[in-house]
Image: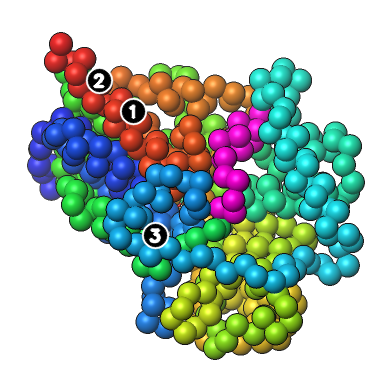
Amino acid sequence: MSEASKTVDVVVVGAGFAGLSAATELQRAGVDFVVLEAQDRAGGRVEAANSLGGFFDTGGQFLCDDMPEVMALARKHGKTLVETPARGRAVVLPHESGDIGRGSAGSFALRQQMRHTDPDDPALESMSVRSWVEQQPADPLAREMFLCMIEGLWCQPADRMPIWYLISNDRRITSQVSELQYFLHETMFSLADDMARSLPVVLNAAVKGIETTPAAVLVRTATTIHAARQVILAVPPVMAARIAFNPPLAAETGRALAAWQSGLVIKVMLRYADAFWQQSGSDGSAMWLDPRGIYVCNASHDDGHPALVMFVAGSTAMEWHRLGPEGIRQAVLAKLAAALGPAAAQPLDVLVRDWTDDPWSGGGYSDVITDMSATDAEEVLRRGAPRIVFAPSEISPSFPGYVEGAIVAGRIGANRAIAALESYSR
Ligand SMILES: Cc1cc2nc3c(=O)[nH]c(=O)nc-3n(C[C@H](O)[C@H](O)[C@H](O)COP(=O)(O)OP(=O)(O)OC[C@H]3O[C@@H](n4cnc5c(N)ncnc54)[C@H](O)[C@@H]3O)c2cc1C
């Protein structure tokens, strides 16, 4: 098939929140642009599925008052905030784990200590999060709870991640209230979908190659070549690394892209006839210390069928992935029954979304740096390459790896592209 050719000022690659935010900014500035999206929908790591006639987010879902950009967008698009129900006791398993109150206070203290540690301290070079934790004077349960929290939030085992990366990343997650404070009744996905409708988004348009010439950048899909003056890559670093660049990216940029791995997560939504957990004083939430990286919380809204949402992250997600959807379902029900009682094994509906081998996001909430020596990887990506701006949530100055971070990264990326366009016309 011969390739059609089109010309625009800017090509945005990816219609997740970063790409949609970049596109909104370009539209506001009156720039001629197009968004190329590999999948048959916008939203990226935010998507929804039907359960018992209602839609539920099977990807990014929660937001809080300390995330100004996503809160403002939700208001602008007339979305309804649902407060995440959290009244009652949270369960920690195994039940015989010890003094949970003391353990979680110790884990919280470790996180504070980590945030106050200088990520540029040469003593931390090549040190993993696990090695750092092992050097801290904390009690074993506090350490264990801390490692569980890390694996649950960053979706990779603590021995894979450099401590300097986690410090720098966690310092940018500045919420004082629970990041699970709210979700959107209409779904977070509906917000992405609303944004995409007013933007020139081309679906089923996976970018395979990017060729840079002195005068232009040529962005190639299976059927079309878009000639542009600037490209914004609003895709996770692992996905950007799969694009063929001609000429190849500078060695330091190639190394910066190769420093990341996708996190690993499986999200499971369960609907029940009633909120049976309330009878035992539970709020429906539970966390597991063994195996690591499993957390469940209440995500019910007022449409009649209470809902729990379970996250399975990191090494446990990799293990459960091998079980297949039915095996994952059985494993989830067994864990929930142990935590919340036998009624947990009788849901009306279960949605299993295994992100671990997702072809367009790579697997988790976000990519994380796993190359212990790649201390400049984010900085190099922020600098970009000739005619190329990188703008995924991962490199955001606030809330990297969140929808909030994607909106901020996309806007910064758009403004850098606009500044570059202005410099070409001088
Ligand atoms: C299960 C799960 C739960 C989460 N929960 C939350 C939460 O509760 N709150 C929160 O704030 N965040 C959450 N997140 C994280 C949040 O969803 C992401 O950080 C955010 O959506 C990332 O946005 P992005 O635009 O940077 O990347 P993406 O959403 O990954 O968008 C990138 C887009 O680029 C496309 N693409 C990739 N390669 C190409 C290519 N070669 N050509 C064209 N298109 C391409 C992809 O299809 C995708 O649409 C969750 C994520 C997951 C997976």
Q: Is mark 3 within 8 Å of ligand 1?
A: yes
The residue carrying mark 2 is 420
Considering the numbered disc 3 on the image, is that residue within a helix, a strand or a loop?
Answer: helix
Residue 188 shows which numbered tag? 3
State whether label 1 is within 8 Å of ligand 1: no
Kind of residue indicated by mark 3? Met
Q: Point out residue 15 in the picture as x, y percentages from the top left corner.
A: 30, 48
Q: Residues within 10 Å of mark 1 (few under 14, many from 20)?
A: many
Q: Is residue 153 left or right of residue 205?
A: right
Q: Which residues are magenta?
A: 163-179
Towards the viewer: 422 or 39: 422
Residue in the picture at 25% in, 37% down? 25
Q: Image point 40% across, 49% down: which residue?
A: 70
Q: Which mark is residue 358?
A: none
Are the residues tagged 2 and 1 within 8 Å (C-beta)?
A: yes
In this rendering, the label closer to the viewer, 2 or 1: 2
Position of 28 compared to 367: left or right? left
